[in-house]
Amino acid sequence: MTKGNLPMASIELAPNEKIYADSGCMVYMTGNTVMQAKARGGFLKSLARSLAGENVFLTEFTTTGGSGIVAVAGPVPGSIIAKEIVPGRAIFAQKGAFLAADDTVNMEIAFQKRLGAGFLGGEGFIIQKFTGQGTVLLHAAGEFIEMNLQPGQNVRVDTKCCVAWDESVIYNITKAGGIKVMALGGEGLFLNDMTGPGTVTIQSMDISQLAAELIPYLPKSGGGGSGPSWSR
C-alpha cells in the first residue's frame, strides 16, 4: 500500500485467483487481468448491499496466463486498512467502507441490534458485515488507529469515527457528558461506547465533517459571501 493521504493498494493475484472490489475503484491492472461487473449473490442481495452504501454491481478481477496486479483506491482522501477475516468471526464496518476483498470473503448487510445505536450511533441502522476467510480492504477519510480492547476494556468514540469493529465488541451509545458539555462542548450529544474484547478501528475525520469545514470557503454565486463570486 502507498503512504500519504491519497493511498492506493496494489493487490497481487495468483494465476486464476479472483477478487472483487467496489465499482469504480480500480486505478490500474496488468494486461492479463479480466474485469467483469457482477451482482454478487444475486440481484436481491446486491440491492440489499446498496442500503449499506455500496453499488448494486461489484467488479470481479481474475487473471489469465499467470499472475497479475490490480491497484485500487478510495473515492476521497483518507486511509486504507487490510482486515483479516477468519471462519466463525465476523467484522462489522460503517456504510461505504468496503474497497476490495478476496473472493472467499462474504459481504452482507447487518442491522444494529439496539435502537439507540441505530438512531444515534452515526453508522445508522444498516451496516456492513464480513464473514468467511481472507482479506478485506476498507477505506475511510482521515488517518486510522486500531485499538485492541481486552475483555471489559472500554473506549468512547465520536459517533462518526467508528470505521470497523469485531463482532465480539459490545456496541452501545452513551451521553457525551452533562447538560453543559452536551450543549456547549462541541462533541455532540452522544458517543459510541465500545467494550472489549476485540479490535476497534477509528478514523480521525469523517468525510461529512470535512465537507462542513470546507463549505464557508467555497465560491458563492450572486455575491454576499466572504469568498470570490463566480459566474459561468
Image (cartoon, rainbow, N blue to C red):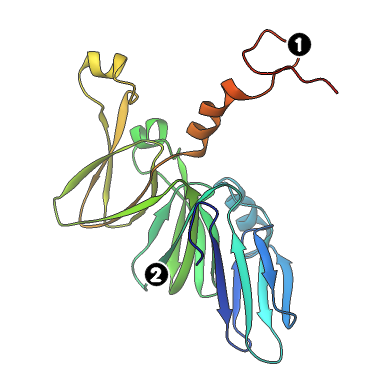
Q: Can you tell which mark lies on residue 222?
A: 1
Q: Single out the residue that lies furthest toward the top.
A: 224
Q: Position of residue 132 (x, y in %)?
A: 44, 71
CA neighbours of label 1 inside 10 A, class few (<14), some (14 to 19), many (20+): few
Q: Residue furthest left?
A: 152
Q: Residues within 10 Å of mark 2 (few under 14, many from 20)?
A: some
Q: In screen coordinates, is 116 left or right of 4?
A: left
Above or below, 124 relative to 87: above
Relative vertical location of residue 100 with respect to residue 74 in this rendering, above or below = below
Res 166 label: none
Q: Which residue is drawn at 20% across and 53% down?
A: 196
Q: Which residue shows up at 20% across the image and 57% down it? A: 197
Residue labelled with disc 2: 84
Within the image, what quadrant is residue 99 found in? bottom right
Say above or below: 30 vs 108. Answer: below
**What quarter of the picture does the C terminus occupy?**
top right
Q: Identify which residue, 210 or 127, lies in the foreground.
A: 210
Q: Position of residue 202 (x, y in %)?
A: 35, 48
Amino acid under disc 2: Glu
Q: What element carries label 1?
A: loop
